[in-house]
Amino acid sequence: MSDSRSRKALLVTGTDTGVGKTMLTCAIARALVERGSRVGVYKPVETGCSVVAGGLLAEDVEKLLAAAGGGQAVETAITYRFALPAAPLVAAAEARETIDPLRIIAGYESVARDYDIVLVEGAGGLLVPIADNYTYLDVARQLALPVLCVVGSRLGCINHALLTLRMLLYSGVRCVGYAMNVLDADKATYDAAASNQRTIARFTAARYVGSFPFVAPNERGNWNRLGSLAAKHLELDAII
């Protein structure tokens, strides 16, 4: 195993798209920075990028970099970016490009050489296709990355969570656990999230590492607040 792969690292996946992976990855990054760690971030592929003068703006990557302290060059934090909001394989085909897994491996190892901890954010769920016969599960396998599953608490999340956790178990990839993300501020949503977590726990041995409270959209760029919430509500020592 190379030195870069012996560093602490984590792949953050989700039960679906729009479940809060980026926000939780930002929160974990800032909490680790506050502990004194040098945190690098890496998102192999971002789709749905905004078209701006000079190219495509990867907004999720910009958030990750800011949360981790802003010292990392954006070019090192992402390998592929596409405008179409679709699975990487589909977005790449629309752009008449082919994603090379070897470039993703090289991109990760470049970041890992320079940081104590590397947080890797996936796109969508664990089996979202990146290239032919290549998914985020394959990224985790190749790079020996433990995986955290973010469960957006909404209708259907129990099935999606159990499928993801079962796939990780059968694949042999280490799962550090699952975190619930509360998607609205009202009491009914919090109650449903607690119920969903209890039900998931009845059907999996995967570790529950905490529930992240709802954060209003206008507060999701407050990195210090997100870091404080991660330190308070998530089992950081179990996660990484």
Image: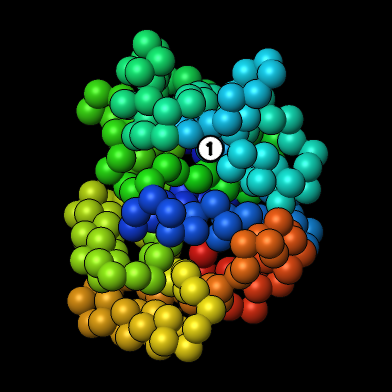
Given residues 227 and 221, the one toward you in this image is: 221
Is 191 on the left-hand or right-hand side of 7?
left
The answer to whether residue 30 shows anywhere in this view is no
Colour convention of the picture: rainbow
Given residues 79 and 138, the one toward you in this image is: 79
In the depicted structure, whether residue 149 falls above or below residue 136: below
Q: Residue 44, how many percent across, how many down?
A: 49, 32
Given residues 209 and 181, the one toward you in this image is: 181
In the depicted structure, whether residue 29 falls above or below residue 43: below
Q: Residue 169, how many percent across, how many down?
A: 24, 58
Q: Residue 211, how many percent across, how many down?
A: 49, 76
Given residues 78 and 32, the one toward you in this image is: 78
Q: Quadrant of the C terminus?
A: bottom right
Name the residue rendered at 62%, 68% in the picture.
216
Name the residue rendered at 34%, 54% in the picture.
16
Name the residue rendered at 38%, 71% in the picture.
153
Q: Which residue is mark 1?
A: 43
Quarter of the image where one finds residue 133: top left
Is 158 on the left-hand or right-hand side of 57?
left
How dense is the environment of label 1, judged by Cα within 10 Å: few (below 14), some, or many (20 and up)? Answer: many
Give the residue furthest to the top. 96
Q: Residue 17, how many percent across, how many down?
A: 39, 50
Looking at the rendered structure, the kind of residue marked 1 is Lys
- SS for callout 1: strand
The answer to whether residue 66 shows anywhere in this view is yes
Quarter of the image where one finds residue 207: bottom left
